[in-house]
Structures are given as C-alpha cells and as structure tokens.
Amino acid sequence: MTDVSGAAPVPRRGVGPQAVLLAGSTGVAQLITALLFVLAARSTSPEDFGTIAAAVALGTSFVGLIDFGTNGYWVRELARQAMSRQEYGRRLASKLLIAATVAVVLGVSVHLILPSSNYWMAAPVGFALFVNQSAQVPLRGMARTELVSFSVLLDRLLALGVLAIAIAVGVAAHEILWLCLTIGSLAAACVGWLMTPSQFRPIMSFRLKTNPWQKSGFYGLNSAALAAQTLDLPLLALAGGAGAAGLYGAVNRWTQPLGLLISAFSSASAPFVARSVSWEEAWSHVRKALWLPALTILGCIAVAAAAPWVVALLLGDAYDGSSALLRILALAMIPVVINSPLSSFLQSMGHDKGVSLIVLISVGAQLASVLVLGWLYGAVGAAVGFAVLQVVILISMSILALRASRARRT
C-alpha cells in the first residue's frame, strides 16, 4: 500500500511573499558566497585560488548534471500528489547513491592523477550541495518556499561561521573553504529534513533497478539548454575576437540581478500551479503576485535608460561601447520576465515536453546567431541575437499556452 501523504497542506503564504523571501535569501546567500571567496583569495596567490574557484564551479556543475531535471519533476509530482512517498523515497535513495559513487570515484581519481591540484575539492562540495537541494524538494512540493529560503540562507551562514572559526584558530581560509561549503550544505540539508513534516518525508528504500531519472528527461533537457547559454561569450570570442568578447563580457551578466526576483517568482509559483486543477485556479494564485514581474520590468527599463552613466561610472571610458550592449540586454530581459514564469507554469501543468523543445531549438538558434552576427557585427550582433531569440521564445511559449488552455476547456 502506498502513502501519498493525504491532503496537500495549505501554504501559509501566497506566491508574492514566498517569492520575495526566496529572492532575498538567495541574494544574501550570493553576497555571503562572494565574501567567502574574497577571504579565501586574500589568503593565497591568484594562481592557487584560481584552481580552488574552478573546483567549486565544477562541483556546482556536477549538481546539475547528476540531477538532470529530477528535482523539478519531483516537485511537480509531489505538489500534484501524483507520486507516493515510497516511490519518491526509492528514486531519491537511488539518485543519492549514484551521486555519492560518482563523487567518490571522481574525487579519488583526480587526487591520484593530479595529487598537487585542488580539483578533488569539486567532489565533496558538489555532493553536499546536491544533498541540500534534494532535501528542499518536499518543502517546495508543499509550497513552503519560505522554509526553502531559510535553508538556502542557512547553508552559506554556516559556511561563513565555520570559516570564521578556522581563521580564528590560524587555519588559512583557502585551505578550508571546501570544507566550509561542504559542512554548510550538509547541515542545511539536515535542517531541511527536520523542517519537513514527518508525513511528507520520503520513505527511503533502495531497489537496484530503480531509475531516478524516469520521466524527468524533458526537465533535464530544458535545464541543460539553459546552461548552454553561458557558451555565448566563448563563441563570441571565437567569431568576433577578444575585443568584442571584452565589451560583451563586461556587462552581459549585469542583468542577472534583474532575473533573481523573477526566478524566485517562478519557483514559488510552480507548486501552486501544479496543484491547481484548472488554468483559472492557477491564475487565481499567480495574479496576486503579478506586481513582482511588473516591478522587474520597470527595473529593466531603468537599467536601459541609465546604461551610459552606469557603464561610464563603473568601467570608465574604455568601455564606452558596452553601454549600447547593456541597453539592448536590459530591454531583452523584458520578454525573459514573461518567458521564465510562463515556461515554469507550462511545465507544472504537464507540458514539459513542449517547453523543452522550444528552449532547445531557441538556445541552439541563439548560439548560432552569436557566431554569425558576432562575426558580422561584433558584440552588438550577439546582443541583438539574444534579444530577438527572447522574443521568439515568448511567441512560441504563448502559442503553446493558448493551445494548452483550449485543450483543457474542450
């Protein structure tokens, strides 16, 4: 007999407050992470710290590769009460065992092959982050994003606390950074487990033939395609030269803070939408928090208007050409503000196949446009290509949403 946990709990907060809490905690966590890296960098040479920073980045990539969309898929299924605690527990146990095995093999192999390097650190850092993100899944499925926010913040606060103690007793920050990050993530995972009511925790068991990635492939393809967008800068350097890549790279990540709030909005909305039986019910939850994307759009317009002054102030006259790029990229974020939650809503309503196909084709076209337009027009061509593709994604997602809505009514 399976246990689907009974009735879904009533969320204590709506989409808007949960999104604000998640965005705030994520922003603070990013600032703490930056502080951790600054402290570690100050204790060693740029060369040595470079390998440590690269190892942490590899560990983060490890999480996305092994997860491959399972967390997002499980959140949806738990929110819809379409997956039992037993089934969830079997899949989670299998995924954790596979992740632990891969981490140990990679960590030991790298240490044996490159004994003088720091790349082995990627294994414990990545696995610990993987465990913490997995522990957040039931809370996300319960639409308790405020508790997820606490876990995200606690992760980095604990890491900072461990690092402070290490420095106080005379341990070099760069030598202990990996352990601080690992302890922070694992401790936050334990707290996340304790915050999850017992009737919603997975019933852990292991079966050899369990496939943790079953039916999550389209979520994984969507995540992989979005991750591939970071290849735009190296492709521009290849097609347009180092100068174009320098102008573009100086500002192409400045719009990320604008996306922080909308990403939190999408994440907080997902379980509300997934548990809704109709588009009308889903809309009743989402419309109360529409001021969040509206505020983000105003922020995009403000950044576009202030681009020349911001670039001149922060980068100087040598990067004058970057102001036009920042303006284009900021305006291109406006369709992104709509695309991000719309794709999340469609996935939550069971249209993950259509979303993944749209994103895969669009990202492929964007990277191709970077090569062509970057070669013809330099950095401006790459920025325009990004903007046009976001409009194409918006049109495609809108058509998919209209068809899905009509299908539900018939």
Image (cartoon, rainbow, N blue to C red):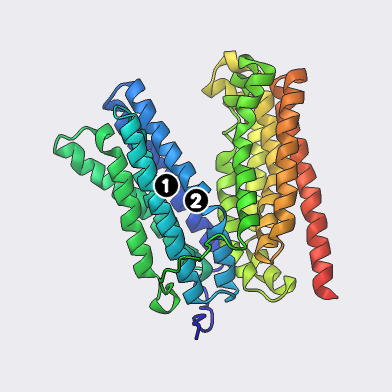
Decide if residue 60 is on the left or right side of residue 300.
left
Decide if residue 325 is on the left or right side of residue 138.
right
Which disc, if any, is residue 66? 2
> Which-is-in-front pick, marks 2 and 1?
2
Q: Is residue 68 above or below residue 176?
A: below
The residue depicted at 49 percent of the width and 81 percent of the height is 5
Which disc, if any, is residue 28? 1
The residue depicted at 31 percent of the width and 34 percent of the height is 112
Q: Is residue 86 above or below residue 22?
A: below
Closer-to-camera residue (21/78): 78
Please indicate, yes or no, whether residue 125 appears anywhere in the rendered image: no
Q: In the rendered structure, which disc, 2 or 1, sits on the residue that comes first in sequence?
A: 1
Quarter of the rendering containing residue 313: top right
The residue depicted at 37 percent of the width and 28 percent of the height is 51
Decide if residue 354 is on the left or right side of residue 153.
right
Q: Identify residue type, mark 2.
A: Ile
Name the secondary structure under disc 2: helix
Are the residues at dot 2 and dot 1 in contact (C-beta closer than 8 Å)? no
Please indicate, yes or no, whether residue 54 appears anywhere in the rendered image: yes
Q: Position of residue 79 (x, y in %)?
A: 57, 71
Closer-to-camera residue (92/94): 94
